[in-house]
Image (cartoon, helix red, strand yellow):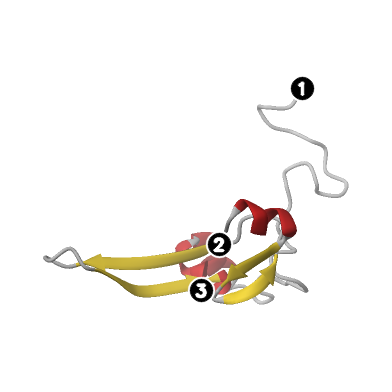
Amino acid sequence: ASAEQTASGQMIYNYEPFEATGEMPGLSVFYKDEHGQVFHTYSTYARGLDMLVGAYNLLDLTPKGRNEVQIMDWVKLHDEYDGKPGSGCCRS
């Protein structure tokens, strides 16, 4: 996306207009033949990338899976858990 599109929040994502304030995940595969021609052979976005993250595969095997209401609402930073004292090597 151009700087103007990013600043306005209006970008193209998965070939459609999309409102976003930052980067969005996506993966594209290209092939270059012996003549130097480049071919776009595959693209995937959003949930299509899940196979690349091993933790998603494990969560999907559990009884409640990811237990999501909205996409990735289960993800928390280490200091965002309720009632848990902070710990770790990098805390001051």
Q: Which of marks 1 and 2 is nearer the N terminus?
A: 2
Q: Residues within 10 Å of mark 3 (few under 14, many from 20)?
A: few
Query: Left of 15 or right of it: where is 43?
Result: left
Q: Which of 30 and 66 is in front in this view?
A: 30
- Residue 13, picture quadrant: bottom right
Q: Residue at x 21, y 68 (%)?
A: 37
Q: Find residue 25 and name its label.
A: 2
Q: How far across and down, in percent of the image, does residue 79 sit?
A: 78, 41
* Numbered tag placed on residue 48 in the rendering: 3
Cα–Cα span, label 2 and label 3: 9 Å
Name the residue located 66 percent from the left edge and 77 percent from the top edge. 63
Q: Which amino acid does label 3 sit on?
A: Gly
Where residue 68 sits: x, y (%)? 73, 72
> What separation in Å lies between label 1 and label 2 (alpha carbons)?
33 Å
Residue 9 in the image, given as x and y percentages of width and height: 72, 61
Q: Which residue lies furthest to the right in this view?
A: 83
Q: Of circles 2 and 3, which is in front?
A: 2
What residue is shown with label 1? 92
Neighbour tally class for label 1: few under 14, some 14-19, many 20 plus, Cα within 10 Å: few
Residue 30 horizontal/vertical position (percent):
31, 67
Q: What element carries label 2?
A: loop
Which quarter of the figure is the C terminus placed in?
top right
Q: What element carries label 1?
A: loop
Taking the image as shown, residue 49 lies to the left or right of residue 82, namely left
Q: Residue at 75% x, 71% y: name it.
A: 70
Which residue is at 56% across, 66% downward? 56
Question: Split into 4 quadrants, where in the image is the N terminus?
Answer: bottom right
Tell me the element at label 3.
helix
The amino acid type, in three-letter code, at marker 2 is Pro
